[in-house]
Image (cartoon, rainbow, N blue to C red):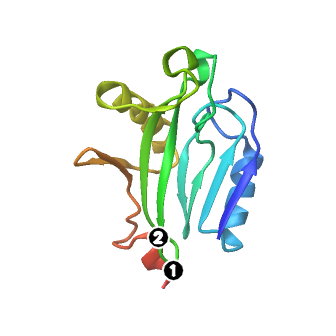
Amino acid sequence: MIVSFHWGQEGAATPKRYQVLTARRAVEAGADLVIGHHPHVLQGIESYRNGLIFYSLGNFAFGSLSRNSDRSIIARITLDRGVKEAELIPINVLNHEVRFQPAILKGKRGKNVIERLRAISSMMGTTIRNENGRYLIDLQQTGQTLAERRE
């Protein structure tokens, strides 16, 4: 089950307490994946019990005129009785650079977005690794992926 919430304070780099509580309750109720949106900036990613929580994907593919919300991610999720794999793809949504057509960020610019997300997600116990140029969320917990823990 996938749940999406329109929540949070616009421009806030960290989720509000109610977001954390609500996302965790959704996972406890059976959600495999929780995706939040509204703050227009990246917040953190949390692996909680058998679920994965994206508190905010940033501006996702919504064009931006603000340097404060110029970078986002696409989360490419593979589901198989739960989250099997989660890949992060950094994107540029700053309109004066991409002309309302979000573009994948590669090289140093892409790495910088992931490093920013890695820093705020590490406070939630989430590890993001680079595996042959792919940014993957480490879903391993006691030797099992989130999907394997569901079985």
* Foreground residue among 125 and 39: 39
In three-dimensional space, the C-alpha distance between marks 1 and 2, rounded to whole angstroms, equals: 7 Å
| Residue 96 horizontal side relative to residue 104, left or right | right
The residue identified by callout 2 is 146
Residue 44 at what x, y percent from top left?
55, 42
**In this rendering, is residue 141 above or below 10?**
below
Q: Quadrant of residue 107?
A: top left
- In the structure shown, which secondary structural element does the residue marked by tag 2 occupy? helix
- Say which quarter of the image contains residue 16: top right
What residue is drawn where x is 56% and y is 68%? Answer: 49
Question: Where is 30 relative to 114, above or below?
Answer: below
Residue 36 position (above or below residue 50) = above
Secondary structure of the residue carrying tag 1 is: helix
Name the kind of residue labelled 2 in the image: Leu
22 vs 53, left or right, is right
Residue visible at 47% across and 78% down in the picture: 149
What's the residue at 50%, 40% (across, down)? 73
x and y percentages locating residue 10 in the rendered image: 73, 29
Q: Are marks 1 and 2 in contact (CB under 8 Å)?
A: yes
Residue bearing mark 1? 150
Along the viewing direction, whichever of 54 and 132 lies nearer the viewer:
132
Instruction: From the top left corner, tell me how far across and down residue 69 is, in percent.
Output: 60, 24
Disc 2 crowd, CA 10 A, few/some/many (<14, 14-19, 20+): many
* Image x and y of residue 38, in percent: 72, 38
Q: What type is the residue that disc 1 sits on?
A: Arg
Quadrant location, the N terminus: bottom right
